[in-house]
Image (cartoon, rainbow, N blue to C red):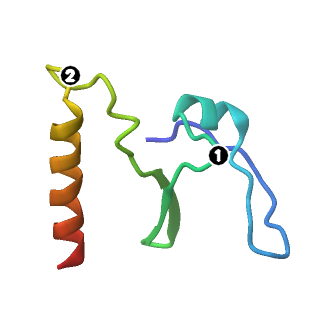
Amino acid sequence: MFIGMTEVSVTPKGQVTIPVDLRKKYNIIPGSKVAITEEEGKITITKITSIFDLAGAGSHIATPEEVKAELDEMRERDAK
């Protein structure tokens, strides 16, 4: 499905600027993480969802202890 295209230039350091309308649409702010993937000759940029993006998405408000426990579990999985 073709949604649209915006042409951007690549700097000598290999950097590109994500257009402001897309940054707003996908809530990409300074410090956001994105994944760059290549498949079938195409490069794709995908925003990586952070814990802050999920705020309010749950059915209840987590306590600080619940958040710490979840983060500890995530760190343990990442360490493996």
Residue 47 place in picture, x, y as percent: 47, 49
Q: Residue at image x 15%, y 39%? A: 66
State the residue position of label 2. Answer: 61
**Residue 55 placement: quadrant:** top left
Q: Is residue 52 left or right of residue 77?
A: right
Q: Residues within 10 Å of mark 2 (few under 14, many from 20)?
A: few
Q: Nearer the viewer, residue 68 or 45?
A: 68
SS at mark 1 in the image? loop
Going by the numbered disc 2, the residue's amino acid type is: Ile
Image height of 6 relative to 60, above or below: below
Q: Could you tell me which quadrant the N terminus lies in?
A: top left
SS at mark 2 in the image? loop
State the residue position of label 1. Answer: 30
Q: Could you tell me which quadrant the C terminus lies in?
A: bottom left
Residue 41 place in picture, x, y as percent: 50, 73
Q: Is residue 1 left or right of residue 11?
A: left
Q: Residue furthest right?
A: 12
